[in-house]
Image (cartoon, rainbow, N blue to C red):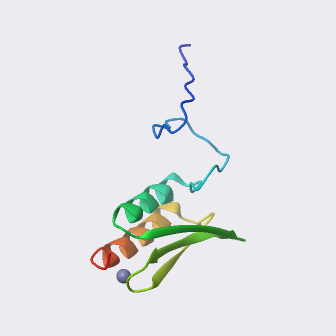
Amino acid sequence: MDRVRTNRSGSRHGSRHTTVPSGDRHQKKDVEAALKRAEKAGLKVTRKQNGHRWGWVLCCPCKADHVVFCTPRNPGQGAQEIDQFTRRHTNCA
Ligand SMILES: [Zn+2]
């Protein structure tokens, strides 16, 4: 019984589980992690929710995009697809 609740704004150390989608985060943590890796690689992550679609990962130099879904049937696979896209386009950015 030693739960300390910190609520520092701007803190990226969120270890608690949230079911409420907030900000630009993807609700599936696997996918969110893959999106972070994509951003780090220089790709553009755009959130534009529309039905089942969460948004896109964009490679600006070659104009390729990869659709990200809100609730992939298999989040692990969804994340893998993003990783594949990232790897394919790391050299473009
Ligand atoms: Zn590319």
At x 49%, y 78%, the residue is: 66
Quadrant location, the N terminus: top right
Instruction: Report x, y in % for residue 6.
Output: 55, 25
Q: Quadrant of residue 55?
A: bottom right
Tell which residue pokes out farthest to the right in this image.
Answer: 51
Task: Determine whether 86 is above or below 33 in the image.
Answer: below
At x 47%, y 76%, the residue is: 58
User: 70 left or right of 83?
Assistant: right
Task: Determine whether 92 is above or below 17 in the image.
Answer: below
Instruction: Report x, y in % for residue 76.
Output: 47, 61
At x 53%, y 14%, the residue is: 2
Tell which residue pokes out farthest to the top in this image.
Answer: 1
Ligand 1 in which quarter: bottom left
Instruction: Report x, y in % for residue 59.
Output: 42, 78
User: 18 left or right of 59?
Assistant: right
User: 83 left or right of 2?
Assistant: left
Task: Determine whether 18 is above or below 90 in the image.
Answer: above
Instruction: Compare residues 73 and 25 and report the one nearer the observer.
Output: 25
At x 57%, y 23%, the residue is: 5
Number of numbered callouts drawn: 0
Instruction: Report x, y in % for residue 90.
Output: 30, 73
Quadrant location, the C terminus: bottom left
